[in-house]
Each structure stands twice: as C-alpha cells, then as structure tokens.
Image: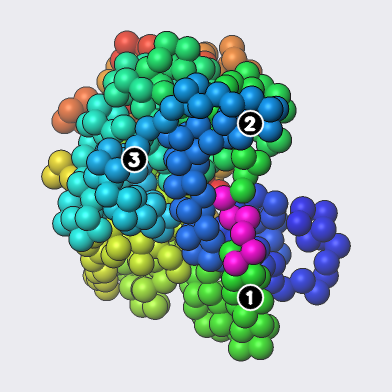
Amino acid sequence: VTARVIKAAAELRVIGRAGIGVDNVDVGAASRRGIVVMNTPTGNAVTTAEHAIALLFAVARKIAAADASLKKGAWEKKKFEGRELSGKTLGVVGLGNIGRIVANRAQGLHMHVIGYDPVVTSERAAELGVELVSLDQLFQRADAITVHTPMTPETKGLVNHDSLKKLKRGVILINAARGGIYDEAALLAGLESGQIGGVALDVFPKEPPGLTDIVRHPSVVVTPHLGASTEEAQSRVAVEIAQQVVAYLTTGSISNAVNVPSVPGEMAPLLGPYLSLARRVGRFLAQVEAFEPRSISVECEGEAANVTTGPIVNAALAGLLQNFFDAPVNAVSAPVLARDSGIQVNERKSTRKGEFTTLVTVLVVGKDGRELIAGGTLAADGSPRLARWGNYELDAHLDGSILVMKNADRPGVIGTIGTLLGESGVNVSRMQMGLDVGQRQAASLWALDSVLPTGVLDRIRQVKEVQQACGIVIQ
C-alpha cells in the first residue's frame, strides 16, 4: 500500500495488516491522509515462538542435513550425531510477547532459561521463570541463543566479529526475528572456527537472500521467513484484523493502530499537536541517551495539562519505548508493554504558568539510577520544538534527520563540524544550540537534508572537543 495507492484511494479510511509488520504500508503517507493503519501484534506470537523452538531442534539434531542425506540413499548415522537440549542453558534476547513464549516452551523441555532485556525488571523475569542477566553474561553462559527483538541500531549486528569471542564455544544461534541482528560474515567466521556450533535463520537482511554463503553452509538451517506461516496463525490474524476494521468503520473504535492513539474521533484535532510533540520528545530521548528504564514520568504543563493527558503520556511512552520491543509500539500498546516489563509510569500535570504556554517533559530514571530529561513545547505555528535537554535550554525543531552533539564550549568547534559536513556533501538547513555556562559545555541540534552517513559521524566523533555525537531520525 504505497503513497501512490493511498493518494488514489479517495475514500480510504483504514488499512488493516493481518500480522505484525507494516513494512508494506506507507504509514507516513497514510498518517498525512488521516488514515488509520492497524495491525495484529499478538496474533502470530505463538506460531513464531514455536518456529524458533523447531529451528533449535533442527540444528541440535541436524535434522535437515540428515533428511537430505537419507533421501539421496545414504545411511550416515554417525555423521549426524546431535545434542540433547534437556539440561542445557537457553539464552533469550528480548522478553516480549514472543520471547516469553519461547522461554515457557524451553522450560517445558527442562532447559535452564536466562534472558536479557533492558526494559524488563528482575522481579518480572523471575515471575516468568527466567534468570535476568547482562548481555555479556548471556553470551558466556548460553548453550543456545535465540533473539526476539526489533531491528534497531542497538540490535543490528548483535553477534559480530567482536562479540564472537564472548560466546560459549559450540553455541547454537537462532534468529526468527529480524534479518541482520546477527552479522552473517561473523556467523561464517564463527562456524569455520568452531566457536559457533550451528545456526538457524528464518529471516535475512535481504529477502529472498539467494544462494549466499550462509544459506549454503552445511551447519546452517534456513527457512523462508516461515515464523508466522501456520494455518492457525493466518486464520487468527485474519479474523482479528477483520474485527478491528469493522469496529472502526461502524463505531469509530480504534485498536492496535500503529499511527494514531485510541481516542474518540472528536478529540483527535485538539490532541493531535500534543500527541506529536510528546512522541517526538520520547523518540529524541531514546535515541540520544543509553539507558535501561525503570521509571518514566511524563509531565504536562500549561495548556497541555488542560486537555486529556492520558493519550499524551501514552504517546510519549510509545516514542520512548519504540527501540526496545520486537513488536511495533504505539500509544495503545506502550503502557501495557511498560507495565509488563515492570516499568513504573508516572503521569503528572501542572497548570502553573511558566516560561512556556505548554510544556511536555519526559523524565527517565534508569537501572543505574541516572535521571535523563527532555522537554518540548509547541511553537507559534504548532510545530514541535525541543525546549530542554538535561541542563540545556534549546529551541530546536524535532523533525527529520538530525545530528545531535555535545561538546566543549570553545571557539572553532561549530566551524569545524560545519566544514566536515560540507566536505561530505551533507547540507545543514538549521542549527540550534544550548549552553551550560557553568560547565563550559554546549549542546546542539543540526537539522540535515539527508540521513547522516556513518563515516561522517565517525569523523565528527574524532574531533577533540566533541564528547557525544549521534545521528537520529524523528518522523
């Protein structure tokens, strides 16, 4: 469902996706047209989890290779000696809907399950029967590892050449989540060295992948993205999306929307600017700071406190938590995901008249006790602006591709960065700066006409006065 299709469909009101991913829908174009995009985020969780377990068995018992051998007329019993799963340690990266089901099924196989998830508390993990550990500990202890996370800059290449040496020798790696979470070149190197004992992949960076080295490797089991492909799951998600679409068209009720919150239709025009602001402030904080959230507070001040604040809080949560879950996060699912992960959510409102007519502030307390804060306001034209980041006061647009930087407040730094960008063909449309005079520190947001190339970012980080630099995208 492309922008061209959406433009031509004058009467289109809702797009329903029978499944989780909406990669085949131009959500941005739909949002601009006011079209609701819905999915079914939990309908195929069981099926995908079962497929991960099936892949684990397939690698441990060398089922695919043994099947192919026997069908060629051979009887190579000794060649295909496998491994038991009972008593082994399974590492689950990502304890969302699918990861939790995998953990439960593995426990039924008498496996010891350890897990890593930056937004799940130890108490919540214990309730699931999972020992919560750090990622390094999981790499060191797990006999088999399965990933169930979204594809983000943090999870891309989670297993790479650097992390290979951390893995337990002979480990089995399973990926039925997103292609690219494992670096395929690193997988090949690990298989050849014996550091990795076997791999199963249901997903690939490019699909179909073709006959690549990883696909053809004898110690790799591959399937063509079958995670959700069962008769039961397809029937379930089809019925669910049909019910959601009918409810929206007949009563205006919105469920599992990926681009709008669940609010009554008459409230949407009033709430719209505040929801966009809150979500963008959350997205900003999530992309510029590294943290494992334990509590999230959203404060609505001024005019924002005079409207229904619940959807504003949910929009901020959705923006903040989007990087942490394997299913799409929106204003409907964000508070549930936070609660299930043991994250405390606080809603505050203040009608005091401060510097801004309206202000939405997001405060995160991380696992390490650090407090991270960002606040935004609405400009005169209604556009969302970043007003505060930590100790810095700014007036920065929250839209598009942005270079975010902290540096020592010394002459020549801005000129150096501008020159680097210009030499690399990166155009800057605007730049806003905030100062911490006492610490002689500066923070700046550079609005770019294109996504910041990784090589350019590396050069910026090498500038002596630069303490932090990252490229983010806010839409």
Q: Quadrant of residue 314?
A: bottom left
Q: Judge by depth and name the residue closer to the eye, 224 or 110.
A: 110
For residue 85, the mark is 3
- Counting every numbered tag in the picture gives 3
Q: Is residue 229 magenta?
A: yes
Q: Residue at x 59, y 26 (%)?
A: 75
Dot 2 or dot 1: first in sequence order is 2
> Helix or strand or loop: what does disc 1 sit on?
helix
- Look at the image and tell me whether residue 288 can be seen: no
Residue 62 spot, x, y in % from top left: 50, 32
Q: Amino acid at mark 1?
A: Val
Label 1 or label 3, whichever comes before in sequence order: 3
Front of the two marks 1 and 3: 3
Measured Cα–Cα span from mark 3 to mark 2: 24 Å
Tag 3's secondary structure?
loop
The residue segment tinted magenta is: 227-232
Q: Residues within 10 Å of mark 1 (few under 14, many from 20)?
A: some
| Residue that label 2 marks | 70
Looking at the image, residue 387 sits to the left or right of residue 121; the answer is: right
Give the x, y percent position of residue 367: 18, 45
For residue 239, the mark is 1
Quadrant that contains the N terminus = bottom right
| Label 2 neighbour load within 10 Å: few <14, some 14-19, many 20+ | few
Is 461 in the magenta? no
User: Residue at position x 24%, y 31% from top?
Assistant: 141
Residue type at mark 3 is Leu
Residue 98 coordinates in the image, percent (x, y): 43, 55
Where residue 209 sits, quadrant-wise, is top right
Instruction: Decide if residue 117 is on the left or right side of residue 18.
Output: left
